[in-house]
């Protein structure tokens, strides 16, 4: 398998609320909710960088499409890393996330490996790490 990930889909419980958080709060560009005309089709796509999109899709729709049983969400299933170019940018992004309604679960801090990071959760408890890695710049 050639690892060419093009979409990361986050299961959400309230698509409108998640759209407001990502679009209005974090400033991620999106056309908004599309696919409302299809049962289990409403989704939000956000272009992250060339060749990579973030999708917000109701967890009920994911369960229906995959045939899996809908289980309670767990914040420890995965994290999303957002790399920034400076220590001060970690603080700025964390402050923006908090203003947007994120829950700060670990404030910005020096890491054991020499970096600087903080963690927040979106409205559906997805965990984001905002990180400055001095090895990357």
Image: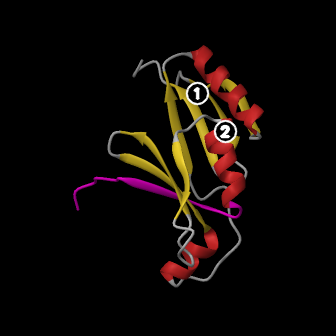
| Quadrant of the drawing holding the C terminus | top left
The structure residue drawn at horizontal position 54% and vertical position 23%, both measured from the top left corner, is: 115
Would you name the residue on which mark 2 appears? 24
- Checking the image for residue 112, the label placed there is 1
| Quadrant of the drawing holding the N terminus | bottom left
Look at the picture and state if 116 lies above or below 97: above
* Circles 2 and 1: CB atoms closer than 8 Å: no
Label 2: how many residues lie within 10 Å, few (<14), some (14-19) or many (20+)?
Answer: few
- Label 2: state its secondary structure: helix
Q: Is residue 125 visible?
A: no
Left or right for 69, reference 7: right
Q: Is residue 18 visible?
A: yes
Indicate the colouring scheme: secondary structure
The structure residue drawn at horizontal position 38% and vertical position 46%, both measured from the top left corner, is: 52
Which span of residues is magenta-colored?
1-14
Q: Nearer the viewer, mark 2 or mark 1?
A: 2
């Amino acid at each position: 398998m050639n690892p060419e990930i093009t979409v990361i889909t986050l299961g959400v419980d309230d698509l409108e609320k998640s759209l407001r958080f990502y679009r209005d709060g974090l400033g991620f560009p999106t056309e908004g909710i599309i696919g409302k005309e299809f049962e289990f089709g409403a989704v939000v796509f956000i272009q992250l960088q060339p060749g990579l999109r973030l999708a917000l899709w109701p967890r009920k729709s994911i369960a229906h499409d995959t045939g899996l049983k809908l289980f309670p969400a767990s914040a420890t299933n995965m994290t999303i890393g957002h790399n920034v170019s400076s220590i001060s940018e970690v603080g700025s992004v964390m402050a923006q996330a908090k203003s947007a309604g994120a829950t700060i679960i670990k404030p910005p801090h020096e890491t054991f490996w020499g970096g600087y990071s903080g963690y927040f959760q979106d409205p559906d408890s997805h965990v984001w790490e905002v990180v400055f890695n001095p090895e990357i710049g």
